[in-house]
Amino acid sequence: MKSTHPTIALVGNPNTGKTTLFNALSGLNQRVGNYPGVTVETKKGKFHWQGQTFNVIDLPGAYSLAARSPDEMVAVDVILGREEGEAKPDVVVAIVDASNLERNLYLTTQLFELGVPVVVALNMMDVAAAQGITIDVARLSERLNVPVIPVQANKSKGIQELKAAVAKAVGASPPKLAPSFPPAFEEEVASLGRKLAGDVPSFLLRRLLIDVGGQTERLFKTETHNHLDEYLDSARARLAQAGCGVPAIEARVRYGWIRQATADCLHRPVQRPPSWTDRIDAVLTHRVWGLLVFLAIMFIVFQSIFAWAKPLMEAIGAGQEWLGAWVGAGLEPGPLRSLLVDGVVKGVGSVLVFLPQILILFAFVAVLEDCGYMARAAYLMDRLMARAGLNGKSFIPLLSSMACAVPGIMAARVIENRRDRFATIVVAPLMSCSARLPVYALLIGAFLASPEEASITNWGWWRPGVVLFAMYCLGLVLAPLVAFALKRTLLRGETPVFVMEMPLYKRPSVRIVARRAIEAGWQFVYRAGTLILASMIVIWALLYFPATHPSGDNYDRLLAERQADRDRWEEQADDLAKELEDRPDSDKQRQLQAMRTTIEAMDDEIRELQQAWKAQSYLGRVGRWLEPMVRPLGWDWRIGLAALASFPAREVMVGTLGLIFQQGEGDASEEGYQLQLGRRLQEATWDDEPTRKLFNVPVALSIMVFFALCCQCASTLAVIKRETHSWRWPAFTFVYMTTLAYLGALLVYQVGSLWSGV
Amino acid sequence: MNWQLTVALAFVALASVYLARRAYRSWSAATRGDGCGGCGCAAAPAPRDQSQRRISLSRYMVRRQQ
Amino acid sequence: MQTLDCLGVGQRGRVEAMAGTDAITQRLYEMGILEGEELEVIGLAPLGDPMEVRLRDYRLSLRRSEAARITVRPM
């Protein structure tokens, strides 16, 4: 399985620009890979240097090779060549942050002991310079006895030099210098090696001795059965007696060695100049301002989702309308036309118009992730998460879930403890993901945005942002509460510790943000074209059939006839009106009035016919059967069935509402279907009380709360099953979230109705 | 009318098959799984049992000596 | 002699000792908290916990409960 091309592994601390360096090295020549049982993706790419091809593996960022979770073990396994189908790397590139040299070199000194040539890429020299830190690179290379190449990954500087150094290092001998442990320690390593027959690398022997309860211990325990536990205990006791107790001995030896090695090549200013990060952090992590800024950032995100998306949405809406008119004109009334116009163009189209909002949301999340704010959010929220029995790190998967719960749930893999990981996974879908955005945006746009609309109060322009923010906060507040309950019942356990580096702020890269937004936009379109399209077609069929009117005729044809009749009348009325403009005549005026009244009656008749058709369709029957259950939420059977239909995927809600409330309206308006759908919803009335509006503010809020809390996403459930290796957790998530959603919607509607007196 | 019905039903059948296949695949922990809205996780593979791809320690020792 | 969690914002101290041999202590060692190292408390989160500490050339946040393992001599 040995590849003929040399393999290069990139290793480094988190936040050292490792991924940027990887991108700079491999260009677009990359694919996402992943190792089994493990974390966050490991990327693979290629680069060429002087006619030779090199494979590059980007390993997850780590502070140390002392693996405490299976995820952290990946790096060790890959470098030692324990990965099936993966060649042992020929060279390890250690990415080192020049502004934080000592701590970064800790991992590098561990790499020296792996028997693989090491090249150090010294990144962020500019940041170091800004802090007044100077490094004598040539001397550092001499002291470490490995090539040290200064690079500036974000500006692609030093990449050619790094490639040349890597190519030269292939086949070279591994580093000869490394921190030396005290003789007492080395003796224990040797005798442990004798005890474990076979040629165990001394690196693993050291790890076995040092990492109390670590992954190496677990690994050897599963494969050897010679009373390893007792032996290790006694060995560690002997080490403590000899004055080199674990784990302190490793840090003392390595940091001592590093300090000596860097003594004459690392110069720090006596007085650290205050950095930008200091100034920004003085506000962002401030006890009072920090939280206010956090809330303000969130509000700006949500407000801009509304403000900036509108022009783009209108353009998409216009295209959709044109398409609908074109398909409608080319086909006779019939099932296929209905499917294409109602199911596909209106159904899928009403979801697709939210593309601009998805782009904006993802761009914002990418900016927050890229500039280093996520760590601050975790810091601000740690106390709250600790009350819930988790730590601040669990907050990062939750924030990621605001884009989508699936990567959020996968991001939880970095949480070491199984119980904490499961608790985070189970509450992550409570965070409002981007698939809820179309539902929120539609209802907020229709019922909570315009100040003239009769509502609880008139708040003005900032109301959409506030309401949307409140919806997101709902998840943000409930997720820790549910986690709290879980950690005291099903997943009982200690509150995990919180030790986290606060990285320096950096200016977010336009390329990364744009790439993230475009990828997300493409995913959204892809999903609309596959899952949502297929769902809409099936829902269309369930709402279309049976299409037989009690008279034995066909609803579709009957409706087309009535519509044609009505259009004829309308034409005549328009002609008459024009005639009247030229020659006023009171008789004809009265005639025109009568015609208008008839047209209105015909409109009502058409609407009734449509409603009767929907009500007797297969899905309509289910909806009406369901109605008693959703009535307390303020919903009628149509809303109930739209919510039911969106259980596989939330966006289907918007499409289904489009199908139900807009069917048969092919006539163009200046607004486009989306805005039109909002108006249709405003005009909709109850079946049994045609004068009573179906939707009002409490109903809209109740629907939104239901969507905020309900687990209507098959992908999320599938990924929970995958991550927990059990069907129980997805089942549990589904049940608790659906219950919570129903109760939440019930509460909001009942309280809201009482309050607003509707 | 009838040709329209035939084509429409064919679409519905196709859509149903697609949904069923998709549901089966994501549930049986296949490699594809894309999430809500527009996350870029469609290509993210499923975690598998670790022992499947890690070489055992004893085999590793043999490999090292070669 | 004090533990790190007793230091106020802006106060500095030199590490004297660290308690424990478990994974948390090991992580703290790896992050460079060693005997003789200088620490500065640079902030507290809104509810007074966790705390942000500067050491070597970077910033670390940790909870008071973990900070209590670290004995420091105030400077």
Image (cartoon, helix red, strand yellow):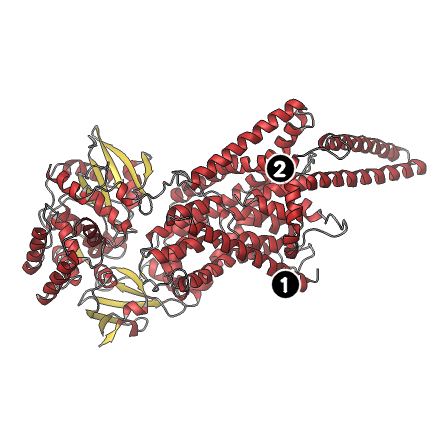
Drawn side of residue A562 relative to residue C62, left or right:
right
Q: Residue A72: percent from the left, percent from the top?
A: 26, 50
Amino acid type, label 1: Val
Q: Which residue is drawn at 8% across and 47% down?
A: A176
Q: Mark 2 points at which residue?
A: A542
Residue at point 13% right, 49% down? Answer: A113
Question: For residue B6, what is the image quadrant?
Answer: top right
Q: SS at mark 2? A: helix
Give the percent coordinates (x, y) of residue C6.
29, 74
Q: Can residue A370 be seen in this view?
A: no
How dense is the environment of label 2, judged by Cα within 10 Å: few (below 14), some, or many (20 and up)?
A: some
Judge the density around disc 1: few (<14), some (14-19), many (≥20) Cα neighbours within 10 Å.
few
All told, the count of numbered labels is 2
Please provide percent x and percent y for residue A100: 24, 55
Does dot 1 land on a helix, a strand or a loop?
helix
Tell me which amino acid carries mark 2: Leu
| Mark 2–mark 1 distance (CA, rounded to whole Å) | 34 Å
The chain under label 2 reads: A
Disc 1 designates what residue?
Answer: A751
Q: Which chain carries label 1?
A: A
